[in-house]
Image (cartoon, rainbow, N blue to C red):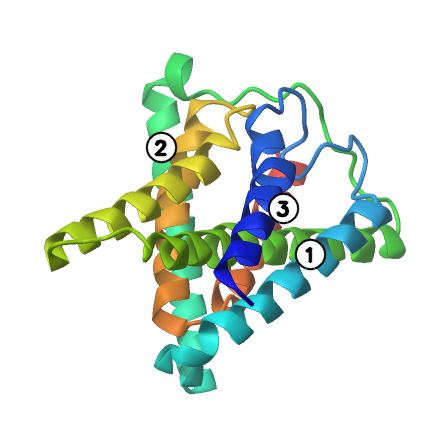
Amino acid sequence: MKKKYLFIEFILFFFILIIPPLFVTSATPFGTESSSFSWLPLFEQLLISILLTVQYVKLIGNKSTCCKRHPFFTLSKGTLTFGMIAIVYAAMETLSVFMPPVLKGILSKSVEKPVSSFGWIHFAIGIFVSAFYEESLYRQFMPEVTILLAQEIPCKTETHKKWIEQSIETAWVLIFAFSHRYIGIAAVLNAMFCGIILRRCFKATGSVLAGTLAHFAYNSLMVLFYFSG
């Protein structure tokens, strides 16, 4: 795919998929629905995630030796990532105890607990698809394509090149973090630190598999905490 067509696709995804979450003001911890995940949005997210992943593998991923990592490495990296983002959550919860006015979360909607086995399966599928979607979008396609397109910028030194790449990395972590601002400052900070960890997981493994599994496990844990609270 020529870079000009990739750039057009990038711009479309940016305005259609990236910008709207930054302006969300009312949602549940797991989405904008008040009861459960709707099937149509989940199907759309799944298709987008698959499209982004296939494009990444074809355009960039097949050039990376990280994609050839042993499955055990991917599994261990995913487990380590889950542990690290769980620690971040614990740290933020601890801070919120001492700084409640600043770090207290604000939710304008509540989510209803599933009442049947099918409801729980539906909810679990929703959590997994949402995790896959965010990993493929915020950790894989958008930052990697941004870095690829930025290669057109003339760089006089290797330091200048690294500075541009680091700026891109920082920008996408912040974009992901502020897409959680509707929950409160604590959620923004939590998403920022978790975003850094999940991005490093992606860079280490070369795929969204480990990050998706860690993200899914983390969100599932949040669901248990939410419904038992």
- Read off the residue under disc 3: 224
SS at badge 1? helix
Looking at the rendered structure, the kind of residue marked 1 is Ile
Q: Is residue 93 above or below residue 141?
A: above
Q: Position of residue 170 (x, y in %)?
A: 32, 42
Sequence-first tag of 2 and 3: 2
Sequence-first tag of 1 and 2: 1
- Read off the residue under disc 1: 48
Q: Quadrant of residue 151?
A: bottom left
Left or right: 222 in relation to 161: right
- The reply to whether dot 2 and dot 3 touch (C-beta < 8 Å) is no
- Read off the residue under disc 2: 94
Report the Cα–Cα distance between label 3 and label 1. 28 Å
Looking at the rendered structure, the kind of residue marked 2 is Thr
Residue 96 has which mark?
Answer: none
Q: Foreground: 120 or 54?
A: 54
